[in-house]
Amino acid sequence: MKNTNSLKLNKDFRRLYRRGKSFAGGYVVVYAAKNKTAQNRLGLTVSKSVGKAVMRNRTKRLIRESYAHLEDGLVQGMDFIIVARNRAAGKAQQQIENDLRFVMDKLELLKQ
């Protein structure tokens, strides 16, 4: 993820949950809002309902990889939180990427 920083602070997560635009797909929920920088920032949330630690870490890796494939086509200057739904456990990378692309398109975050 060459043009994306990590979103780590709790206040940033809370701001996005409160004021961000959101849309739920089959495997992920995306919250998005503008930030004050020229770069995108990404935060991931995978709860224990997805599975044990191995499954949660694998799901995070798949979501990061899917985001990296979409990164060049996204609008810049945004904060994103991607929340994995429990249905994402055990899914292939291509399925998660297709769902993430669908959600980003619905939020109108893909460049035309």
Image (tube, grey):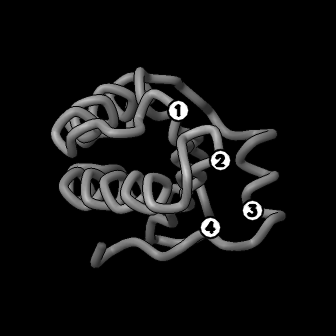
Residue named by callout 3: 12
Tell me whether circle 3 and circle 4 mark residues in contact (CB < 8 Å): no
Of circles 1 and 3, the one toward us is 1
Q: Which residue is mark 4?
A: 36
Secondary structure beneath dot 4 equals loop
Residue designated by label 1: 86
Earlier residue among tags 1 and 4: 4
Q: Do the residues under discs 2 and 1 have CB atoms within 8 angstroms?
A: no
C-alpha separation, residue under disc 4 versus residue under disc 2: 32 Å
How many neighbours does mark 4 have within 10 angstroms: few (below 14), some (14-19), or many (20 or more)?
few
Secondary structure of the residue carrying tag 1 is: helix
For marks 3 and 4, the one nearer the N-term is: 3
Amino acid type, callout 4: Lys
**How far, Cα to Cα, is label 3 from label 2?**
22 Å
- Where does the image place residue 82, in percent across and percent down from the top left? 52, 47
Left or right: 48 as drawn, with respect to 89: right
Give the foreground label among 1 and 4: 1
The amino acid on which the numbered mark 3 sits, given as a three-letter code, is Asp
In this rendering, the answer to whether 109 lies above or below 71 is: above
Residue 48 — which label? 2
Which of discs 4 and 2 lies nearer the camera? The answer is 2
Q: Residues within 10 Å of mark 2 (few under 14, many from 20)?
A: few
Mark 2: amino acid: Lys
**Residue neighbourhood size for the residue with mark 3, other residues' Cα within 10 Å, grouped as few (<14), some (14–19), many (≥20):** some
Q: Amino acid at mark 1?
A: Asn
Measured in 3D between alpha carbons, the distance from the residue under mark 2 to the one under mark 1, in whole angstroms, is 9 Å
| Image coordinates for residue 89, horizontal then vertical, percent | 41, 38
Q: Nearer the viewer, mark 3 or mark 2?
A: 2
Of marks 1 and 3, which one's residue comes earlier in the chain?
3
Q: Nearer the viewer, residue 92 or 10?
A: 92
